[in-house]
Image (cartoon, rainbow, N blue to C red):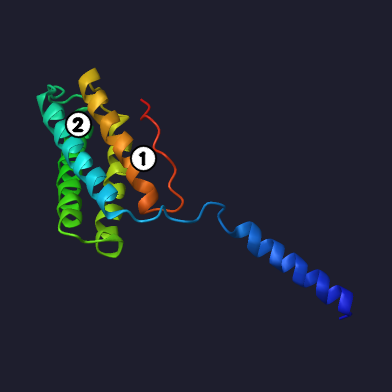
């Protein structure tokens, strides 16, 4: 292989590796006080969502939405619990490493709940509470996920 050919191969390889690296792959600088405050807001917002969802009348037995409603109800309960655990851990002074698994678990549940929510009719007050949760998650995500894409409003 000639010198110019080796140089060309090296330049192409560098270009491939550089193109594969995400553009904004840095986490937001860790700010314990801010992350803790956001987690507290998230815990409060998920509690409000849970309370409001439970006030919504369930679909009638045998309804096409009944199963999705029950699954969504369970996921909202789990999201509330995980958000509370994340908030408590951060309030005790735990940092990124200790709370990352809780954040990741929370986001898995949020993604699953968003899929279920597309199948269930919800009232304006439930949608408002879900929006409040989404707003806080969008502020919290850059501290845990360098490739965080803001959550958009769930569509039905």
Task: Return the residue at label 1.
Answer: 138
Q: Quadrant of the C terminus?
A: top left
Task: Estimate the x, y position of residue 148 in percent, counting from the top left.
Answer: 43, 47
Residue situated in front as seen by the camera: 83 or 28: 28
Mark carried by residue 44: none
Comes first in the chain, label 2 or label 1: 2
Q: Which residue reaches farthest top?
A: 124
Q: Quadrant of residue 68?
A: top left
Crowd band around label 1 with a 10 angstrom C-alpha radius: few (<14), some (14–19), many (20+): some
Q: Residue at x 26, y 43 (%)?
A: 38
Mark 2 Cα shell of 10 Å, populated few (<14), some (14-19), many (≥20): many
Label 2: element kind: helix
Using the rendered image of the protein, determine whether residue 62 is visible from the camera's viewpoint: yes
- Give above or below for 14 relative to 41: below
State which quadrant residue 140 falls in.
top left
Mark 2–mark 1 CB contact (< 8 Å): no
Percent position (x, y) of residue 60? 13, 22
- What residue is drawn where x is 19% and y is 24%? 63
Residue at 14% x, 27% y: name it: 52
Q: As drawn, is 58 to the left or to the right of 68?
A: left
98 relative to 23 in the view: left or right: left
Label 2 belongs to which residue? 69
């Amino acid at each position: 292989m000639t010198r110019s050919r080796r140089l060309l191969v090296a330049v192409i390889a560098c270009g491939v590796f550089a193109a594969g690296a995400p553009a904004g792959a840095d986490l937001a600088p860790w700010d314990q006080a801010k992350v803790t405050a956001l987690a507290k807001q998230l815990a409060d917002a998920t509690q409000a969502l849970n309370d409001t969802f439970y006030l919504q009348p369930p679909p009638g037995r045998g309804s096409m939405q009944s199963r999705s409603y029950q699954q969504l109800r369970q996921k909202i309960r789990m999201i509330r619990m995980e958000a509370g655990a994340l908030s408590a851990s951060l309030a005790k002074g735990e940092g990124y490493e200790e709370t990352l698994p809780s954040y990741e678990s929370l986001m898995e549940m949020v993604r699953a709940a968003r899929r279920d929510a597309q199948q269930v009719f919800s009232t304006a007050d439930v949608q408002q509470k879900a929006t409040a949760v989404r707003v806080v998650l969008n502020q919290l995500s850059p501290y845990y996920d360098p490739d965080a894409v803001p959550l958009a409003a769930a569509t039905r």
